Amino acid sequence: MNTLPDAERLLSALADKMRGAIAFDAKLVGIYSGGAWLAERLAQMIPGEHPVGYIDVSFYRDDYAERGLRPNPATTSLPFEVRSSRIILIDDVLYTGRSVRAAVNELFDYGRPQAIELAVLIDRGGRELPIEAAYVGARLAVARDASIVLQRRDDGTLALSLERAGDAGA
Amino acid sequence: MRNPQLNAGGELQHLLTLEGLPPEVIGRILDTAVPFVSIAEREVKKVPLLRGKTVFNLFFENSTRTRTTFEIAAKRLSADVINLNIGVPSTSKGETLLDTIDNLVAMNADMFIVRHAQSGAPHLIAQHLSATNKADIHVVNAGDGRHGHPTQGLLDLFTIRHYKREFRELTVAVVGDVLHSRVARSLIHGLTTMGTAEVRAIGPKTLLPTAVECLGVRVFHDMREGIAGCDVVVMLRLQSERMKGALLPSSGEYFKHYGLTLEKLKLAKSDAIVMHPGPMNRGVEIDSAVADGSHSVILPQVTFGIAVRMAVMSILAGS
């Protein structure tokens, strides 16, 4: 069963909202792994010079004490000065807000940005922290125990699926 | 019997030796170390993983490089680090090793980094912590006697994988004083666990342990023969201070037969890398032209050592 909207259509909707709204020199920083794919695609869809960076929040997660370090963390790579930059943080699903909190903390360890905004493909509600996205592809309500997972097909297009009782995303 | 380094869930609880550690556990440490390398290049060289934790560096034997890199690693993980260099004076007051540990446990230690001249000392501490219901305190072996130096073995593996990728396609030579070298033992166990195609031990009979073949290595007494076709050459320090009796005629004689020169290195593969755990004896086991030459990855080993120790500590503290 898959009643989720088409990821490519949501991506177009998100790009429409960001086009003209984000700074001409804004840097796009995708949170691994879904946000990283979105950042690459958005950089091609939005006019202007938008360098892409990637962030892995494994070393900044607040559930480390309970769950330990996740296997195979990726390398954060920000190939530009964070100091004084305008940054658009990009994630696939905004849920509790904890990943975004971790990403903001990590960004500040690279320097003091001029501004950080948040863009997400899906906002599913359920926030546990005072965090909101400036650009949203769609708002969706799903069961608490379900995870919305973004996948990238071999041809580079994106797709969404629903996983029950999983714990990915957040 | 369960591996004393792993908890009931198969996660790493202590790091005491590489011997018997599953390849997945070693692989996970190496994978986790990759993103830690780049932290040294940032404005703030710290991540908050071990914030609020207290790490004790317990060094019953001298060390500069290992102690410093453990200290930097713990600090970059935001831990509080206490360095204790426990030499002969304090043990002569009569306190036993385990009494020292109990006192530090009473100070709310979260992790012990232990170097000791006696093989097995870190294992003894880990057993004692389990027996006293303090199994949530982690122990890392930073070198025990002639037994092992697992984080050095791991950083050597990390360095080899960084430059050479697949262990299954590699021929690695470990050259020199294998007899006194815990570094060599840890590296050999690590290399064989990771499926290295061929591991060679090269040295004079007096400096290779009896039946060293049992570790899964090919033995060579002639260096030119042993080094031929190697992808990686690991030079060991000649540990003169540990030598009792006449194992060698002279260091000059040793250099002539087993010192790595550019001329001998030509027998290895043209893209071979040269490693050394440090500290180096220039002109004894390695010629300066090699140590400072284009094949040498001796200084990157030190840099990678910090990332590997960060990976070990963050995996342990989260288990």
Image (cartoon, grey):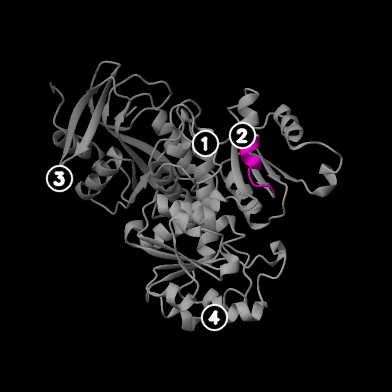
| Residues tagged 2 and 1 counted as in contact (Cβ below 8 A) | yes
| Residues tagged 4 and 2 counted as in contact (Cβ below 8 A) | no
| Residues tagged 4 and 3 counted as in contact (Cβ below 8 A) | no
Between B266 and A58, the one nearer to me in the picture: B266
Question: In the displayed structure, does residue B7 sit left or right of residue B92?
Answer: left
Q: Secondary structure at mark 2?
A: helix
Q: Residues within 10 Å of mark 4 (few under 14, many from 20)?
A: some
Between A90 and B28, the one nearer to me in the picture: B28
Above/below status of B54 relative to A76: above
Q: Nearer the viewer, mark 2 or mark 3?
A: 2
Q: Amino acid at mark 1?
A: Gln
Q: Residue at x 73, y 47 (%)?
A: B60
Q: Position of residue A137 (x, y in %)?
A: 22, 31
- Residue denoted by label 4: B289
Q: Amino acid at mark 2?
A: Ala
Q: Secondary structure at mark 3?
A: loop
**Chain of the residue where label 4 is placed in the rendered structure:** B
- Residue denoted by label 2: B126
Q: Residue at x 56, y 68 (%)?
A: B205
Q: Secondary structure at mark 1?
A: loop
Q: Position of residue B279 (x, y in %)?
A: 63, 65
Q: Which mark is residue B5?
A: 1
Q: Which segment is the magenta one?
A: B118-124
Q: Residues within 10 Å of mark 1 (few under 14, many from 20)?
A: many
Question: In the displayed structure, does residue A26 sit left or right of residue B134?
Answer: left
**Chain of the residue where label 1 is placed in the rendered structure:** B
